[in-house]
Amino acid sequence: MTLPTPFLRRVCLKVVLTLGLLSMLLPAFCQENPDLKRQEAFLQLFEKEVQNRAFALLSISAISEKVTEDGDKILYREWVAFEEFLQKQYKPYAEKYGLSQEPRSTAKAQAFFGELASDILPQKTFYETMLDQTEDYLEKLKKLPDYATSEDLEFARFVVKQEEAQVKAIAHKIKGENQEAASVFADFVNSNQ
């Protein structure tokens, strides 16, 4: 095929060269940005954690109002203080990422059913179930530091440590060691202020 004028030949040559260049550059623009993907994973997991803390504060506060034994009262007083402390620690990061610390309907429903379970289930079964769920969640939460920016890394490690403290405290509760469980919460707060 012969193009009739030099002008059309130049236009066609420019189009071919432009398309060729675009076809070489397009894959670079279409690749996923690993930093963006990591940031999205951090945000998704942290958002879940913020709502988990909202659920925990509601649930633990409600249960604390029902306990009657002195050992349980001491434990739950420290547990509520622990959850309130975490709310304060999480606040700057929640605000940084535009996340509300107010419990959503899912967190409210979880708190309702958690409180109901504490009323219905035998105490040991309730706490064993709580421990299993907390340990499972901890395994997921351990990925948070991997997703964090260097700026948020220390906080992400703090988030994992507080969940580990809860696992330890619940294990003490299962053994009937309420004072030791309460001390885990109090020590965590005191060592992180």
Image: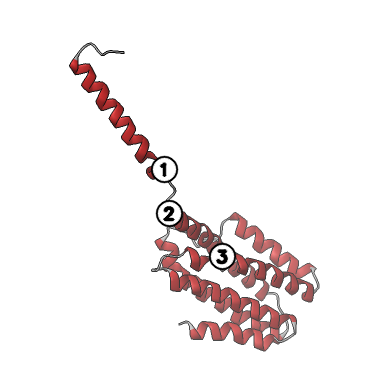
Q: Which residue is mark 3?
A: 54
Residue 129, quarter of the rendered image: bottom right
Q: Which of the two residues, 97 or 109, is positioned nearer the viewer here?
A: 97
Taking the image as shown, residue 125 lies to the left or right of residue 19, namely right
Label 1 vs 2, first from the N-terminus: 1
Label 3 vs 1, first from the N-terminus: 1
Q: Which residue is mark 1?
A: 30
Amino acid at pointer 1: Cys
The residue drawn where x is 28% and y is 26% is 15
Q: Which of the two residues, 98 or 146, is positioned nearer the viewer here?
A: 146
Q: Which residue is mark 2?
A: 36
Q: Which of the two residues, 154 or 32, is positioned nearer the viewer here?
A: 32
Q: Position of residue 69 (x, y in %)?
A: 73, 84
Which quadrant is home to the C terminus? Answer: bottom left
Q: Residue furthest front?
A: 1
Indicate which label's residue lies in the foreground, 3 or 2: 2
